[in-house]
Image: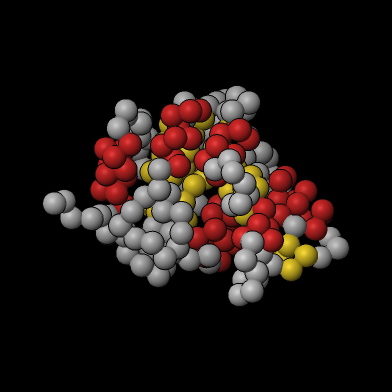
């Protein structure tokens, strides 16, 4: 794993034990990250295609292996429960099994940069993220821009509104299972057109092979 260039504008998180461990695991599983981050204080890593829970596992090890602090989104259930989809559970914010160490689990997740989001709150997920990050001078936010694993040929608009509201630069990132790597692309400055920006990202992700699907840009009419 090539060291990512770190500048004074990046949020640093030195990990003396977990850092070497993360780099060792990435080497063992033959997964890599290439490219670099722009020298900016507010960065959104906009990744695709998202087709497997392994995407998050590999991203977690990349986070450990770097000396940077990342933020990521997770359902509130991930912060205090053993998340096992149970058919009769209708509330997505109470998915899984509660346990007596939920408060410890929450502290650990928050310490690693997790941002808990509520699916059932009247305030949308995008606004919840904006509220969490707007007071931070610098941050790196990791987003899977497709949202759900089973979708294709589409990108959700959250990256755009978060980037615009927080004046963040977007770094399109390919989750490339064919070459077993996260590929950080050239920084992308948002325009005044959501559709233009979504199309630009879809062009970047076009034909990238994820674990369970290949991303295809929709054909123009």
Look at the picture and state if 114 lies above or below 175: above
Residue 187, by quadrant, is top left
| Residue 173 in sight here | no
- Residue occupying the far bottom of the picture: 87
Question: Which residue shows up at 59% across the image and 28% down it?
Answer: 134
- Counting from the top left corner in percent of width and height, residue 68 is at 60, 40
Closer to us: 43 or 126: 126
Q: Report the side of 59 relative to 158 (left or right).
A: right
Colour logic: secondary structure
- Counting from the top left corner in percent of width and height, residue 26 is at 55, 60
Residue 141, by quadrant, is top right
Question: Which residue shows up at 16% across the image and 51% down it?
Answer: 220
Question: Which residue shows up at 50% across the image and 28% down it?
Answer: 166
Question: Which residue shows up at 36% across the image and 67% down it?
Answer: 213
Look at the picture and state if 179 lies above or below 40: below
Closer to us: 188 or 123: 123
| Residue 96 in sight here | yes
- Residue occupying the far right of the picture: 100
Q: Report the side of 70 relative to 80 (left or right).
A: left
- Counting from the top left corner in percent of width and height, residue 175 is at 41, 56
């Amino acid at each position: 794993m090539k060291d990512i260039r770190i500048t004074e504008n990046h949020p640093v998180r030195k990990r003396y034990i977990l850092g070497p461990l993360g780099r060792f695991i990435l080497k063992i599983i033959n997964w890599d990250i290439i490219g670099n981050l722009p020298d900016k204080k507010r960065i959104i890593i906009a990744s695709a295609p998202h087709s497997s829970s392994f995407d998050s596992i590999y991203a977690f090890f990349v986070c450990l292996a770097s000396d940077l602090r990342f933020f990521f989104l997770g359902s509130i259930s991930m912060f205090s429960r053993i998340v096992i989809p149970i058919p009769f559970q209708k509330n997505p914010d109470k998915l899984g099994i509660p346990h007596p160490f939920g408060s410890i689990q929450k502290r650990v997740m928050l310490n690693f940069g997790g941002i808990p989001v509520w699916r059932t709150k009247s305030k949308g997920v995008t606004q919840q993220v904006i509220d969490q990050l707007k007071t931070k001078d610098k941050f790196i936010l990791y987003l899977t821009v497709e949202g759900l694993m089973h979708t294709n040929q589409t990108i959700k608009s959250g990256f755009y509104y978060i980037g615009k509201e927080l004046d963040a630069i977007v770094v399109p990132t390919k989750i490339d299972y064919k070459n077993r790597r996260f590929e950080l692309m050239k920084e992308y400055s948002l325009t005044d057109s959501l559709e233009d920006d979504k199309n630009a990202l879809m062009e970047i992700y076009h034909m990238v092979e994820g674990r369970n699907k290949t991303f295809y840009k929709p054909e123009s009419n």
